[in-house]
Image (cartoon, rainbow, N blue to C red):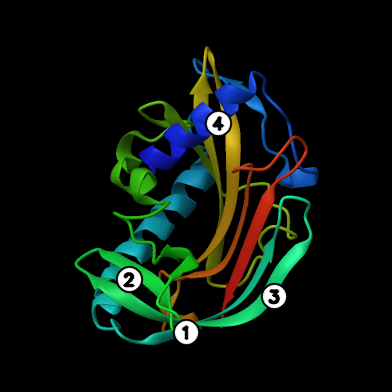
């Protein structure tokens, strides 16, 4: 994560200016003061604690599922927001300990969201390992993460019984401010009563500036079947 944050920071600096891109909740490029911190709401703290607990329980499930197939419905869009693919993708779980990844079954390449996500790896690693002292943003080197479970649009993450939607915004430092370059929405299953995928990310959407030009973003979506 640190490598990708550094790359995006250098990319933005090379442009010589900060560009706000995208539309609606998919806008990236907003700026926030590096000195502004805020405590999590009670709702966010309770929801994230539940998510982290489910992700921790998921590790034993993943350990017993290495080599198993997981199917996703995916959609990707290029910098101009033109759909480049809309596919059903079959993946194979690989890895060990707490590091598990999804590989495409057809070519053994990384899935668009390769991290299987646990409480110690992937997007939630910093959230869960720093939970007792967590505040927004969570700072790591020259990068920062803003996380919430409140005010999430159904167009970004569809609420489901026994699952919690989490919004994660990633930023890089430029001078005395953080610049948002990536936004993700992840829906995590928190109840084993909803099936055998406790702790799994059942829906995920990501928008990112990446290598796009002014006014453009890449978009990736996946739905676990």
The one nearer the camera, 54 or 125, is 125
Q: Residue at x 51, y 45 (%)?
A: 44
Q: Residue at x 39, y 62 (%)?
A: 117
Residue at the spot of label 1 = 106
Residue at the spot of label 4 = 11
Q: Residues within 10 Å of mark 4 (few under 14, many from 20)?
A: some
Q: For the residues marked 2 and 4, what is the alpha-carbon distance in whole angstroms? A: 36 Å
Q: Residues within 10 Å of mark 3 (few under 14, many from 20)?
A: few
Mark 2 in CB contact with mark 4 (< 8 angstroms): no
Give the mark, 3 or 1, whose residue is nearer the N terminus: 3
Using residue 181 as the reference point, say whether residue 121 is left or right of it: left
Give the mark, 4 or 3, whose residue is nearer the N terminus: 4
Q: For the residues marked 1 and 2, what is the alpha-carbon distance in whole angstroms? A: 26 Å
Residue at the spot of label 2 = 58
Q: Secondary structure at mark 3?
A: strand
Position of residue 121 measured from the top left corner of the image (x, y, whole percent):
32, 55
Q: For the residues marked 3 and 1, what is the alpha-carbon distance in whole angstroms? A: 16 Å
Q: Indicate the quadrant where residue 153 lies.
A: bottom right
Q: Residues within 10 Å of mark 2 (few under 14, many from 20)?
A: many
Residue at the spot of label 3 = 86
In the image, residue 79 above or below residue 140: below
């Amino acid at each position: 994560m640190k490598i990708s944050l550094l790359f995006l920071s250098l990319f933005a600096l090379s442009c010589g200016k900060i560009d706000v891109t995208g539309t609606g909740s998919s806008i990236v490029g907003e700026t926030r003061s590096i000195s502004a911190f805020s405590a999590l709401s009670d709702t966010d703290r309770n929801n994230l604690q539940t998510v982290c607990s489910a992700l921790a329980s998921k590790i034993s499930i993943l350990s017993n599922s290495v080599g198993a197939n997981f199917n996703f419905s995916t959609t990707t869009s290029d910098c101009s927001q033109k759909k480049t693919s809309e596919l059903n993708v079959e993946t194979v779980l690989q890895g060990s300990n707490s590091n598990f990844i999804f590989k495409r079954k057809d070519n053994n390449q990384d899935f668009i969201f390769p991290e299987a996500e646990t409480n110690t790896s992937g997007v939630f690693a910093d959230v869960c390992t720093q939970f007792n002292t967590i505040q927004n943003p969570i700072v790591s080197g020259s990068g920062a993460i803003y996380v919430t479970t409140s005010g999430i649009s159904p167009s970004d993450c569809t609420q489901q019984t026994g699952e919690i939607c989490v919004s994660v915004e990633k930023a890089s430092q430029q001078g005395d401010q953080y610049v948002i370059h990536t936004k993700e929405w992840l829906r995590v299953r928190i109840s084993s009563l909803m099936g055998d995928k406790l702790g799994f990310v059942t829906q995920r959407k990501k928008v990112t500036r990446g290598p796009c030009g002014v006014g453009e973003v890449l978009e990736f979506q996946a739905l676990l079947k």
